[in-house]
């Protein structure tokens, strides 16, 4: 049976993992190569390395970090953050990444999705969507496509609402783009995206659980996999996002922070709840 | 020496580093002469079956056929495995190697496509490639088209219905999943292939 995926995310700044995770059996908790290998050995189905380095100068270390991390990693390896062109993507693939994520650059030039997909295959192109439910002032029209009284009549079908009011944010979640999340998901898929990494800006960092409604809404309008991100705080949140959110994969940056010793324990919890998992690995 | 055939379809870095990790020497080449004289030939591939047209145009297809005639060892991965069949409904008119007598077809519409993620293989035949690999091992797939069950099928995977995960006959081997991304089980398969004399 096709299993649901648990993806470990490493946020890196200038070649170092920045979200602190306490490990006992690791030499250097800030080294992405060592952490990636540890996560994979513990049962992570995939590794995502997100470069959050602010300055352009320091970003030069990324390719070397990717090369070092990829060398001994034999599960799918995705790299994102600041990829703006086919050349940027090519350098990351050459260094050993299997997939890249693109976000702001794809919103400002959607043909970039097609361009990278034609060269490296759709399976290698993840479009990252940072979504916020509260709609910004300049895009109020997004929420008024369907009159509110009609919505009130169909509260249960909100996830299929073509005007589901969530907006795409760019520039690290700082700037509203004015685009509706579902419209953008449909367009990105038609342009060659292979997967979505959907982050709820509302939930990110809250540990209040994934935004299942948002995830289900996107999952309902595309056929490619949706990776849910933002808000993981307990093992049951993962159960919820796979069941109610219809996610194909769930991502967490600080997966070891909620009292579980390993990804293995999370996977066993999900297995007991009836979610198909790759476990034991 | 593993010869990795480069026909400009996707990214060869992952397959290359997996063989290198196993201690193999790897040459990445688009030169038909280099392929013709090779003992271990690997054709990877991602994306569209239509990309295999480049193998025909570049003379690589003929080189692979010549190598197979003198019993070279051949491993096709993903689209490289699909190429070992007669052809694909994804790109009608582009012939495969016809090592296995069937057409590659899209997944039935009842299941979400592409099939992406970790799924299990059920091993159901004598196989050199899967020696030491446990039955129901997890492997990583990413594809929208798949091979039906044929007489050379040695492992199947279920998604909607059963399809060929691994095919094998004499010196030719094909895997629909990505062994270079499938953890220890995948590495074991690549090692088995590399160690065939």
Image (cartoon, coloured by chain):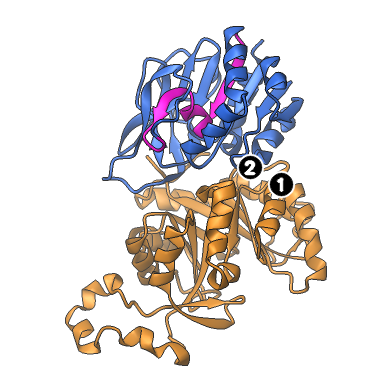
Give the residue pinned by disc 1. A94
Q: Which of A81 and A116 is in front in this view?
A: A116
Which numbered disc covers residue A167? none
Between B114 and B85, the one nearer to me in the picture: B85
Residue at 44%, 19% in the rendered image:
B98
Q: In which quarter of the image is the C terminus of chain B?
A: top right
Q: Check contact, mark 1 vs mark 2: CB within 8 A.
A: yes
Q: Does the magenta stretch include residue B136?
A: no
Say which chain tag 1 marks.
A
Q: Where is residue A103 in the image (x, y as percent from the top left)?
A: 57, 68
In the rendered structure, the answer to whether residue A85 lies left or right of residue A109 reads right
- Asked if A229 appears above or below B59 in the picture, the reply is below
Q: Is residue B76 shown in magenta?
A: yes
Q: Can residue B188 be seen in this view?
A: no
Query: What residue is shown at x 77% (from left), y 25% (from top)?
Result: B25
Shown colour of chain B = blue
Q: What shade does chain A have? A: orange
Image quadrant for the N terminus of chain B? top right
Q: Residue furthest right?
A: A57
Query: Which residue position is annotated with label 2?
Result: B11
Span shown in magenta = B71-91
Residue B169 or residue A256, whichever sits in front: B169
């Amino acid at each position: 049976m096709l299993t649901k995926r648990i993806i470990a995310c490493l946020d890196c700044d200038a070649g170092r993992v920045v979200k602190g995770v306490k490990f006992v059996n690791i030499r250097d908790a800030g080294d992405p190569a060592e952490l990636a290998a540890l996560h994979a050995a513990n049962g992570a189905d995939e590794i995502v390395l997100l470069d959050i380095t602010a300055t352009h100068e320091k970003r030069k270390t990324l390719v070397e970090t990717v090369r070092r991390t990829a060398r001994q990693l034999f599960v799918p390896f995705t790299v994102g953050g600041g990829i703006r062109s086919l050349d940027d993507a090519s350098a990351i693939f050459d260094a050993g990444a299997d997939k890249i994520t693109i976000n702001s650059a794809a919103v400002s030039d959607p043909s970039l999705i097609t361009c990278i997909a034609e060269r490296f295959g759709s399976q290698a192109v993840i479009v990252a969507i940072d979504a916020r439910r509260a709609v910004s002032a300049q895009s109020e029209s997004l929420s008024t496509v369907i009159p509110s009284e009609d919505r009130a009549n169909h509260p249960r079908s909100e996830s299929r609402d073509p005007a589901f009011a969530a907006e795409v944010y760019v520039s690290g979640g700082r700037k509203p783009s004015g685009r509706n999340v579902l419209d953008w998901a449909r367009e990105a898929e038609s342009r060659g995206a292979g997967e979505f990494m959907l982050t709820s800006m509302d939930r990110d960092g809250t540990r209040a659980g994934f935004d299942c409604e948002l995830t289900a809404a996107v999952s309902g309008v595309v056929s490619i996999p949706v990776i849910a991100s933002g808000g993981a705080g307990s093992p049951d949140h993962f159960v919820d996002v796979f069941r109610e959110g219809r996610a194909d994969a769930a991502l967490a940056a600080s997966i070891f922070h909620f009292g579980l010793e390993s990804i293995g324990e999370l996977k066993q919890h999900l297995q007991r709840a009836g979610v198909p998992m790759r476990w034991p690995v | 020496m593993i010869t990795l055939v480069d026909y400009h379809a996707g990214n060869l870095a992952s397959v290359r580093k997996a063989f290198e990790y196993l201690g193999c020497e790897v040459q990445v080449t688009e030169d038909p002469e280099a392929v013709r004289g090779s003992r271990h030939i690997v054709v990877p591939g991602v994306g569209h079956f239509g990309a295999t047209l480049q193998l025909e145009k570049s003379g690589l297809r003929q080189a692979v056929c010549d190598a197979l005639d003198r019993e070279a060892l051949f491993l096709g991965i993903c689209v490289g495995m699909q190429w070992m069949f007669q052809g694909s409904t994804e790109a009608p008119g582009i012939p495969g190697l016809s090592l296995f007598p069937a057409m590659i077809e899209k997944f039935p519409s009842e299941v979400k496509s592409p099939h992406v993620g970790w799924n299990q293989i059920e091993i159901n035949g004598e196989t050199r490639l899967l020696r030491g690999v446990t039955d129901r091992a997890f492997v990583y797939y990413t594809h929208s088209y798949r091979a039906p069950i044929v007489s050379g099928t040695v492992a199947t995977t279920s998604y909607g219905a059963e399809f060929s995960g691994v095919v094998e006959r004499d010196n030719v081997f094909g895997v629909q999943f990505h062994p270079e991304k499938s953890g220890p089980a995948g590495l074991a398969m690549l090692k088995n292939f590399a160690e065939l004399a």
